[in-house]
Image (cartoon, rainbow, N blue to C red):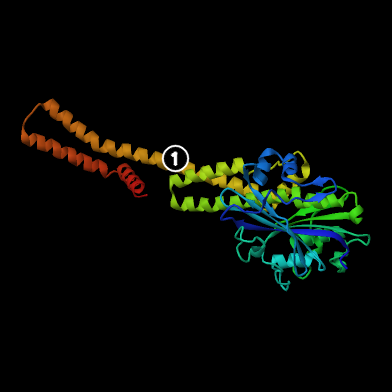
Amino acid sequence: MTGLARHCLIAVYPAHFPTTPTWAEGPLVLRHRSMSSTAAARSDYYRAKAARILYGTPGAPRRWHDAARKRIGDIEILGVEALRMDEGHGLIAVHLRCLHSTPIELLRSLAGRRDAAPMPFDPQTLVDGQAKVEPGTRPYTVSFATHGKGGLPRLYRSVRYRRWPVAGQWLWSLASRTSLADYPPDPKNLEPADSDIIRLSVDWQAIVLRDGTAVIGLRPDQGHQDPFFGYAAVYVRSIYLDAVLLGLLQDQALTALEERMMAALDSSMAATMAALERDVSSFRHQLWAQHLTPHGVPNRLLSAYQREHALRERFDQVLTEISDFNRLARDDENRSVNATVVVFTLLTVPVGIALALLQVLETDDLWLIVTVSLACLLLTALLLRTRSARLAIRALRRRLTQ
């Protein structure tokens, strides 16, 4: 049939958590022989900053799981995980596999491709009221597959794709969640490009695209007796998935920052921009990371995700816009101060001259006092009609009406 020996999929949905989940604390625990993917084991693998984001602390956890297995039609649910941030937003990760159909058909359904079968499950029913998943949300997917002795079948059998390696075809289809009917690739520009493939070892490869990550085995899987692929499946569903989850959280937070940036620019309120600067500082210190662990693979997966979603460029753009806004705000503040000084000077200098003149004359003549006062008012009026005075008054009026 498909030639697959083992496979699993993880569908990751953005979610909102009204309250703290009541599931078991910690990530989904996976085991293979002597290895166990507990929160403690994963925390030792990652640096403290990344571990704090992904798992929380003993007194303030951020991860919960439901390990109950369920069968929905041709789908077996292997477990559900929740990752909740302090603000109440987060992610739901559904671990699943196909019992009879191919994973590519399931991925096409999850992606909502044309002529694909309807979604086989509703993620909202799987979370059991622990979170709110928006209807119609398309998940980000992480896929893992190995093949038996017969090898993987060619997905694109046309002669024009004869130069396309079978491994590349499966990586592309699993990560892009497409088939030939959805997107016939250009034979002159076959993907994934060699530079996009993450070569994990001689046994397996990975690729990270905009909507999905795929990992495939390159040699025959020997089943339960295989010396490596059992561990590989645990890696994909635990520490490698966690690297992708961190990228998704960064994407969520950057999108929120961009939305708040637009609101701040529209309102032109210094207080709003100050709050946004605090949010950016919090994002930089809490979520923004590029080096998760001394071990290389999660770093490469996160870097690939950031590259696909232009996270670094978007973050630099947010910083640039804040810097530009602050510069404009400072310039506006300087103009307001200068305008205030100009208006104050124009109003007080003629009065000072008039008072000094009357003091020198030492007179009590009412007509002379009135004449000097009128001359003072006339001089003030003439000064206020100059271009510099008009600009200063306009700047003050604009400042006061903001």
Residue type, label 1 = Arg
Q: Position of residue 337 (x, y in %)?
A: 36, 38
Task: Pick out the residue farthest to the right.
Answer: 149
Residue under the point 61% across and 66% down: 135
Residue under the point 82% across and 68% down: 100
Name the quadrant containing residue 339. Answer: top left
Residue 111 shown left or right of residue 277 in the figure: right
Q: Nearer the viewer, residue 280 or 37?
A: 37
Is residue 131 visible from the viewing direction of this image? yes
Reading the image, the residue beneath label 1 is: 330
Q: Position of residue 195 (x, y in %)?
A: 79, 50
Assign the N terminus to one quadrant of the image: bottom right
Name the quadrant containing residue 104. Answer: bottom right
Q: Position of residue 87 (x, y in %)?
A: 56, 50
Name the quadrant containing residue 15. Answer: bottom right
Residue 156 shown left or right of residue 91 in the figure: right
Q: Position of residue 38 (x, y in %)?
A: 74, 46
